[in-house]
Amino acid sequence: MSLHHPSPSVDNNASRMQRRLNTLYSHLVMASNFSPINDLGMMKNYHDEIIVENNKTNAAGGKEKTTSILMNKFPKGMIEESDFKIVQVDFEQPLASEGDWIVIKLLQLSVDPYMRARMAPKTPKGYFPAFKLNEPLHGGCIAKVLSSSTSVQHRYKQGDLLFGYFNWQLVQKVTVGAKFETIYQIVKIDPKLKVPSSNYLGILGMPGVTAYHGFLDICQPKKGEVVVVSAASGAVGSIVGQIAKLKGCFVIGISGGSEEAMKELKSAGFDSLINYKDYPSTSTLKTAIEKASPSKEVDCYFDNVGGYILDAVTLCMAKYGRMSLCGAISQYNDTGAEMGPRMNSLYVVRELKVQGFLISSYQKRYQEAVQQLAQWTLEGKLKALETKVKGFENTPKAIIRLFSGEQKLGKMIVDCVE
Ligand SMILES: NC(=O)c1ccc[n+]([C@@H]2O[C@H](COP(=O)([O-])OP(=O)(O)OC[C@H]3O[C@@H](n4cnc5c(N)ncnc54)[C@H](OP(=O)(O)O)[C@@H]3O)[C@@H](O)[C@H]2O)c1
């Protein structure tokens, strides 16, 4: 066997991998303008349209019942189960010959921290619109087409699997209008691909793309640099840490996860893990970070949590350090404003670059991110870490778990049908 020519089996494996990648890309980018990232402008324009449509279906007074999860009241502080209402609603099967529609059944749904900001009478300026009281919440879902009108059967037929932003209603009719793919940000999933459909909610979906652009574009990591990521056991953080490792960095994760979760993160490539619950103050956490870092400093910080963890890492930043501010989950349920130390001069003297971002701004570059993420995942270089909660009715419990300190690892997904 020549060293310079791959053996037929290696060659076959490589071309099989290339074929799988090609098929995966073609499906991920099939809908023009598609991106599974919430587009801010689009959500503003079409929010009402989505809600009204499903209300019409519910009001039809049909013979079948289905389950819907509504916003019952806006949470005050920490989210509670009573903030949601699980109701049985009428569902009427539409006539195949009338209109352009699909009837879908939710199989899996994603619960995300950003939903907390939308559970308020008003959202911050420049953010997505608030959820409405007594209407179904919505978010990224994997759904199966149960039936479709004759007019759209050439595009969507019984048994097709879709990713889309759908209402939290187990069975629902969705109108396939001219802007259907754009409004619902549809991806058709090929079950023959060796990618679990849940990956479209995590590593190949919004959290994966957030990790990719938010880390690589803003932090611009270099080989050998020290990277710290908080909420390292979360959907975004677990991917940031793995990407940092692929870029040759020394990666420190900050997490409050279980021993099991920490072990998983280690095996995914994290060099060092700090449990923030062992270091409940800025000064003790700062010392722990300095101890974990080979240079005693931090070159890049990807912040998912804000609060005192952000303060502690900021104090460890090296000259010309870069900080990507992705989220502040430790503050989402706060009722008052939190005050931290003012570090204005530190930013100046260490010449830090500090940038916040919303992934909706990267919508046009979705394809670039997902192609790279898909390749790394299929090559086994990225692990898709997921925690699954069983049962659509347990969705409120699943969303509460994002904030409650209950242990989880990676993307939190609800399996709607047990
Ligand atoms: N900028 C954007 O466009 C964008 C897009 C997506 C997500 N985000 C933000 O990115 C962050 C991570 O999102 P994600 O989807 O990865 O979330 P996730 O999967 O729900 O993970 C969040 C993790 O945060 C940790 N956490 C919760 N409360 C905490 C607290 N008080 N202090 C410290 N850690 C806490 C928990 O892990 P432990 O076990 O470590 O406690 C939890 O598992 C969130 O802030 C989210 O809002 C921003």
Image (cartoon, rainbow, N blue to C red):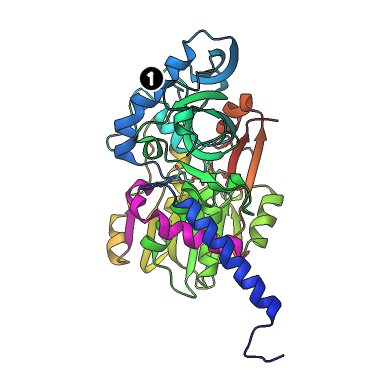
- Residue 145 visible in image: yes
| Residue 250, x across and y down, in percent | 54, 69
Q: Callout 1: helix, strand or loop?
A: helix
Label 1: how many Cα within 10 Å (few below 14, some 14–19, many 20+): few
Q: Main secondary structure of the magenta part?
A: helix
Quarter of the image where one finds residue 10: bottom right
Does residue 360 lie above or below 263 as drawn?
above
Residue at the image position 35 percent from the left and 47 percent from the top: 33
Give the farthest residue toward the top. Answer: 61
Q: Nearer the viewer, residue 119 or 341?
A: 119
| Residue 225, x across and y down, in percent | 47, 72
| Residue 114, x across and y down, in percent | 44, 37
Say how many tags the image has. Answer: 1
Say left or right for 390 vs 348: right
| Residue 91, x across and y down, in percent | 54, 15
Q: Which quarter shows the N terminus? A: bottom right
- Residue 287 visible in image: no
Residue stretch in magenta:
352-379
Q: Nearer the viewer, residue 177 or 310?
A: 177
Q: Nearer the viewer, residue 72 or 374?
A: 374
Q: Amino acid at mark 1?
A: Val
Does residue 198 lie above or below 323 as drawn?
above
Residue at the image position 35 percent from the left and 50 percent from the top: 363
Q: Which quarter shows the C terminus? A: top right
Decide whether residue 372 is among the magenta residues: yes
Q: What residue would you read off at disc 1?
A: 52
